[in-house]
Image (cartoon, grey):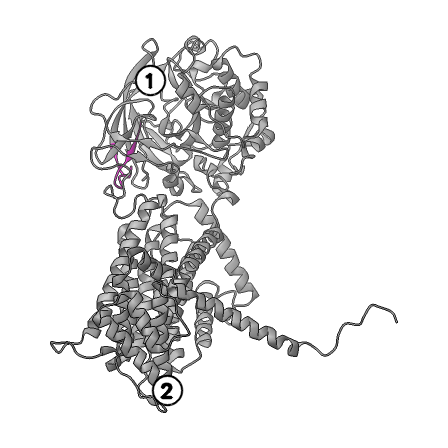
Amino acid sequence: MISGRARLAICAWAATLTAACALLPLVEPSTWFVQAAFLLAVQSGVGAAARRVPLARPLTVAAQAVVTLLTLTLVFAREQALAGLIPGPDALGHFADLLRQGGDDVSRFAIPAPLSDGIRLMLIGGVLVIGLLVDTLAVTFRSAAPAGLPLLALYSVAAGLSDNGTDWLWFLLAAAGYLMLLLAEGRDRLSQWGRVFGGAPGPGGDSPGAVAPVRTGRRIGAVALGIALVVPLALPAMNGGLLDPTGRGVGSGAGGGGTISAVNPLVSLRNSLNVDEDRQVMSLRSELTDVSDLYLRIVSLDDFDGTSWKPSKRSITKVPDGVFPTPPGLGPEVGRTEFITTISTAGSFGQQWLPMPYPPSGVSIRGDWRYEPVGMTLVGDHGQNTRGLTYEVRSLRVQPTAEQLAAAPEPPPALLREYTELPDSLPEVVSSTAREVTAGADNAYDQAVALQEYFTLNGGFEYDTEVDVGSDAQAIARFLRDKQGFCVHYSFAMASMARSLGIPARIAVGFAPGTPQADGTVTVGLRDAHAWPELYFEGVGWTRFEPTPTRGATPSYTVPDAVDSSQPDPARPSQAAPSEPSAEPSASESCTPERRKLGACESDSPQVALDSGGDGPKWYGLVGWALAGLGVLVLLLAPMLWRVRTRAVRLGGHGRSEAEAAPFILGVWDELTDTAWDHGIAPDESLTPRGAAERIVRLGRLGAGAAASVHRVAGAVEQVLYAPRPRPAVGLAEDVRGAVAGLRGSAGRRARVRAVLLPRSGVRTLWAVSGWWGRVRERMPALRPAWRWPSRQRG
């Protein structure tokens, strides 16, 4: 037969595992979960054995912590440990290295990340720490309610790391595990209360006392579950919460409107782009004979806060049937040619935004997609992504001339104001360098060309993928000073400098032209990931520029005296299309074959600007925020938790023997008077128990049943105070519960809420601390040493 405490330990183990299920979508494969479950079972078993001895509570927790450390050492640092089990300095150093590696992997990879040793240690170690906290609170100290806080912290970390929020299934699992833990504790307590709790049988012979805790538990569970479901609605990171009718999507249904938030779309590309070897992600076939400037655009970043660019919050609609609207700003006098491109994505390339040649004029695609009209992009709805798709895009090849761009009129005021906005934190060197580079330019087009040539030709810049981007306000200033970087540096700097000159600018993210193949297709690899600036010219619209050396193709309208607008710059062979088809995947020209063999080449990934190197979110930062949030939550709920614990202790006693009768009855009376105080009836120490009972009945406007319960408790207290040998009293705990129900029934909603969340009787803790400090101060003179410091005065 399993004992109540053993059953509670099993429930604590299961509750921790159900909450840990929220971490499953974060990494692949999920084999770590089996290890975590086994090690957590070992930890719980050690706790059960220590409690059965029995050991003191602190020793029980210490034994579990030691065994947890030993098992982690056996799994992760066996070679560095003493005798393969005991952690020494080498093993602890190895743990630190693994945690550092895990923190770097967290900031490097997208979800789902690969299961590296560092990430595996963070996951398993985190689950074991949470499991130890839950087991300590719920089983060792017999207080299951506060054990929900570490479970909530575990779920919150998973929800915060996930790019689209944790799936509702994991939330329901975690909630079910916590409720199971509460029910197990309640069942254990009920089994100990016995007949004292049951009280007198009701009219039908059944015991109303046994029904009350079940009904109360159901109410508490319903309220807790309701709060957990509704609170995420106010949290932007939860995408509307579980009650959001749009589910995991970004819109508001199948055909309505909606918005997309300013979450960086490149997060879903990290795992594909940040790898050490190139591989194909797309294959396309186009009607264009020259694909050297066929860029695949994913999304535009137009919100600049001084440290990074990101997409603004935009309204999305149903994908237009037939022909898309004319691109913003494109006039009828500008030459254009429509062409069709068929794109097939690899099964490993799954992200939310659809790569398309810009500007698109129509899309034929299956799935649940929505249309963002400002950027003319398609975004997946309700979990839709690009994995393994084949779709057809009709696009316009816009062919403006240099004269048309130079003669472009002033943009509309609203557009000019939105796309030239710069933060005050932007260093002055950005605008001063822009004015210096463009000195003598007659118009915005000449200024844009001067900026492009400054980066590609005469500025002395060097293409280098190993340069750290940084995420502070001085990142662009450092790039202009050091003159080394890759596409993120160049596009961010040129767009910021263009805005400082009054030219509307934004960043486009996608893929540079791929590599033509012998069969007429074009392959696009990971290392074709690219970012470039788009500048707005009235009458032409958003126009691509290419400031990154050795990458992409120079736009023909920026080359002086260009004969054929389809030809790249002959003076820059590195940007031209290959003369003959190649079966090899495209690669950065800065990476030699020798370096590729050694694995020293890095992906030219635009998202590095958001979190790379030491600027991304670190594991200790996430843990710190989680602990800080947990601390704030504990502080806010401390009065309520204290009252719940105090009530359980006072009413959970037995008082069946004469020795236990007096403490139990006095504790029950204290609980009654404190509950009345919580509901606004302050205690009056000058009254007798009978007088205090009459006052509680009168001020609390109690009914006959509740009033009788109050007087029975008062009579038991008078017997304790005045009778030579007080007799045990039966049913007092149930009397107090009846009186409490009466007080709550007569109080208003605000008073009931305050009595639960901010109980007035909580001031007793302050009085207790003050009394303890007073006693300590009284004993301090006796603890002082007999000797004193010698006086500095001379006799």
**Image x and y of residue 613, in percent:** 51, 43
Specify whether 74 is left or right of 748: right
Residue 33, quarter of picture: bottom left
Secondary structure beneath dot 2 equals helix
Residue 384 part of the magenta segment: yes
The residue beneath circle 2 is: 722
On residue 578, the disc is: none
Q: Is residue 614 above or below residue 659?
A: above
Residue 366, quarter of picture: top left
Q: Amino acid at mark 2?
A: Tyr
**Magenta residues (range):** 377-390
**Image x and y of residue 477, in percent:** 57, 31
Q: Where the C terminus falls, by quadrant?
A: bottom right
**Are dots 1 and 2 in contact, CB under 8 Å?**
no
Q: Which residue is located at x 47 percent, y 46 percent?
A: 617
Residue 93 part of the magenta segment: no
**Image x and y of residue 508, in percent:** 40, 28
Q: Which residue is at the front of the view, 744 or 335?
A: 744
The residue beneath circle 1 is: 397
- Residue 121 seen by the camera: yes
Q: Amino acid at mark 1?
A: Arg
